[in-house]
Image: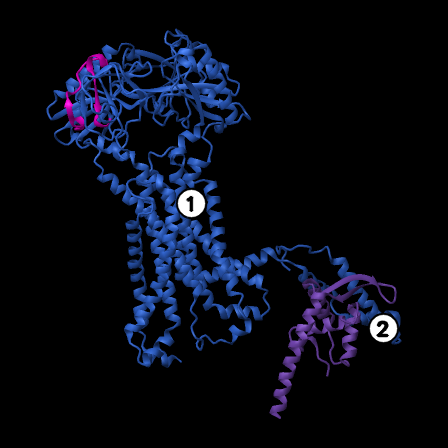
Chain colours: A blue, B purple
Amino acid sequence: MPSWRFSFRKRTLDPQYDSELRFHIEKLTDENIAAGMTREEARRRAVLEFGGAEQIKEELRDVQRIPVLETALKNFRWAWRFVRKSPSFSLVVILTLALGIGANSAVFSAIDAVLLRPLPYPEGDQLMRLEQFHRKVQAPLGRLAPARLEDWNRMNSTFQAITGYYTEDESETSGILPEKVTAAFVAPRFLQVWGVAPELGRDFTPEEQRWGGPSAVLISDRFWRNRFGADPSVLGRKVTLDTSNKFSCAIVGVMPPSFLFPDRDADLWIPTPLGGPYTENRDVTWYLTIGRLKRGVSLQQARADLATVQAQLANAYPKTDADLGVSIEPLKETTVGGVRSSLWLLFGSVSVLLLIACTNIVTLLLARAQQREHEISVRFSLGAPRAAVVLQLLTEAFVLALAGAVLGLIVAGAASKVFEFLAGNLPRVDEIRLDARIVLYTLICSVVATLLCGLFPAIRSTRGNLSNSLAKTGRGQVAGRYPLQWLLVGVQVMLAVTLLAGAGLFLKSFQALERVSPGFDSSQVLTFHVTGSYAETANPRTLAQRIDGTIDALRSEPGVEAVATSSGLPGLARNYEVELRFTDGESTPGHKILANNRFISDGYLAATKIPLLEGEDCRKGFGSQETGALVNRSFANAYLAGSAVLGRHLQAAMSNAFLGPGEIRGIVGDAREEAVNREPTPTVYWCGNGFDPDPYYMVRTRTDPMTMTETLRRKVHDIEPGRSVFDVKLLAARLDEAFGEERLRTLLLSFFAATALSLACVGLYGTLSYTVSVRRREVGLRLALGALREQIIKQFLFQGLRVTVLGCLAGWGLAVAFTRGLSGMLYGVSPTDVATLSAVILLVLVVAGIACLAPAVRAARVDPMQVLREE
Amino acid sequence: MPIEKSDLLQGTLDMLILKIVTLGPIHGYGISQRLRQISKEVLLVQQGSLYPALHRLEKRGWLAAEWGESENGRQAKFYKLSAKGKQQLKKEEWNWNRLAGAVASILQTAQ
């Protein structure tokens, strides 16, 4: 007995065996004594008659043994033999599963990294994003004044600490050429909130965070490597920001490479000192705010707490704080919440794909089990219990699934590379990786696939009547109709139709987007930034002159048609909806004037080709007193219908430094400023520079704009040597990127749907081929009796198509239910668009028809003589 | 001529054991004695076959076993038929009779 045999209860029963056998020997001895033998002789004879007690005991142990490992090994050996014996069958199964599991694992790795894992900071779930909002105005006022941030931090009882930051793109000029850097200006307690320490050096000291204290900067790992060659003695060296006025600060630390906040472009973190002249102003909107909750505090408690704090502030500062509310959301939610539905949609689709793959394999295994019926019944007749046969069939499926999963991991590795490439804009995309969790998930997938694929065929093929199938010779039987296989094929068609319907709707939605006329012309427009600093806004007139100077210089370049600046690009601008009022007398009482507000320079209309309908373009200058404002046609129609438009004066209903008062000098055509897929809303264009130190520059050129890049860069450098030009891109490309997520989702869903359709067709083809092969003899007979070949073709074709049609009908129903959930993701097409669904079904019917044709023709080619001779 | 186990049809020994145990709780020695007596010394079952068969039947739940005192006062393991065993026996007896009948009629016809 080999010692590695793993078994339960091996020796514990031995004493019982001994006494049972001893009793028998004693009885035999008694018998012998009764027959007249001496005691010794009787005993000797009894032992002799009884035979090898040790051998019997071993057999009794065998009865009790449950040889787990041994059976498993044996099953695996058999399964391996089975896999090798039919390589093409195994290959098809393994490849199908590899695709199904691989795609599933790839999407899961994205879901895991983006949605499931906490943010990559210590106890990342405690991090919250805080915003203030104005109760009466729908506007992005979310940023906090430094004074209010300090109040919140001091007065709350639910946060460990609250901090804030804002970013600026600056020029760093300590090197030979100015270099654009992204600097985050941070409020006190910044690193404390993140719970991250610098890799090299130290955090800011309290002195460095006070007005007039020593300057300090933390640099990113990337900046440290690129700019300082990862020099460990970098601490104490200076970084010079030269955008507005020369400003040097000493490096006190280097952050770890994993610290990528606010985004992966952040190079520098610089403290904004407390106690400066600006810190008392409660109207400014500076800081994006982050807080770390105390342990065990719930989101609701934090919300209630901050609401109380803000209510106290409203009492203390009624003028500035009365109408403000506080919103708190988990930082993870605000980071990834937008892509959640897309990712789950993809995961759902890819799981449906895996389901189709499994269904496909079930049909293959069922067909295979029918061929093995004889083998299985022989094993039954030799006394194998049913559980053992089922276990062995499952082991075969598991070996196939495992091979598929291993291959699937390779597929997933490649797929997630493609995914990262396609989804460069996805939040947290650089955290996607294949690690132990994904391997574990893939293994679970393979076990689930085993059960899905293997259990049903195994149970079904071991249920048959033993003597019945033994009696069959395989040749004499009349072919069955295999309703189960056809049902499974129908299910595959149904699922494929559902996925195709989703993909079709997305494609149609994209087409609709491309046909939209947005009201502006994005071709031939180059856009870029020139570094600027918020410090410049202290002197807005100078700032306006600076930017106007740059605009004029660019305009003088030959080949340039128009130049303008704007705080947001057309088609990409955030909605900045504010309530306005007319300063010159009557507007309809009780009629709120809500409008989207945009800030543009002169030349904006020429650069975007938004038509001027009435009046005149913006003027150069500073402040809307001088420059005036334009309104779009929707605004004029909504709020000034039937009365004079030009010459009216507008300003914000609440005091607002940016919005007016200004005179309406022109009416322009409606443009989809907010997004290409949103209808134009009433919009006011406030003219002039001076509020935004870092607007977008838009240059419309007569030739290919990209070829002008270097010329324009040099031009800016000539008049502003301390500033850098960065983020140079075509407007059209930016608009394109804005739909990156939609594109990715459409692309992947189309790919999954196409794969699903191919799998369904393989299933259809395989099942029909199998039916044909089983019914060859019958077909031969019918041909011999005079049936026409066309009839045979028609019959098999219809058998396949009937199932397809039923699958399509079921798929239609499922698609209608499923696509209802897509309505928020579609543009210009209804989720139950009949044209799309009909096109999908037509496509499926055509492809399925082709898949059915080959086996049907093969059936008709049967040579009757040959088949009959085989009998 | 006595018939040894190897000559017995597969499963027949199990049926015979079940049948003998219907008479009441009995130990292994008793079973081998009864088999010999009832079959008039035709069936000689080796202990090497008998005990594994008993344990197999017990494991399948057709026999129940318990330790008790034998007629000479020694501890012995007594087997008795379970409800499941009763059903199994009925099934096997029916099968056997059918087979025996079939074989017999073939033999008679061929004479």
**What's the residue at 22%, 25% (across, down)?**
A641
Q: From what the image shows, is residue A757 above or below residue A345?
A: below
Q: Are marks 2 and 1 in contact (CB under 8 Å)?
A: no
Residue A839: in magenta span: no
Q: Position of residue A436 (x, y in %)?
A: 47, 41
The quadrant of the rendering that contains the N terminus of chain A is bottom right
Sequence-wise, the earlier of marks 2 and 1 is: 2
Residue A508, picture quadrant: top left
**What's the residue at 76%, 71% (across, down)?**
B22
Q: Position of residue A798 (x, y in %)?
A: 33, 66
Mark 1 lies on a secondary structure that is helix
Residue A422, picture quadrant: top left
Distance between the alpha carbons at the discs numbered 2 and 1: 74 Å
Q: From what the image shows, is residue A809 above or below residue A278?
A: below
Which chain is home to disc 1? Answer: A
Q: From what the image shows, is residue A124 above or below residue A394?
A: above
Tell me which segment is drawn in magenta. Answer: A606-634
User: Quick one: A627 or A52, which is closer to the camera?
Assistant: A627
- The answer to whether residue A196 shows anywhere in this view is no
Label at residue A105: 1
The amino acid at mark 1 is: Ser
Residue A629: in magenta span: yes
Label at residue A379: none
Q: From what the image shows, is residue A601 above or below residue A858?
A: above
- The answer to whether residue A15 shows anywhere in this view is yes
**What's the residue at 37%, 41% (across, down)?**
A416
The amino acid at mark 2 is: Glu
Q: Position of residue A524 (x, y in %)?
A: 17, 31
Residue A645, picture quadrant: top left
Which chain is home to disc 2? Answer: A
Report which residue position mark 2 lands on.
Answer: A31
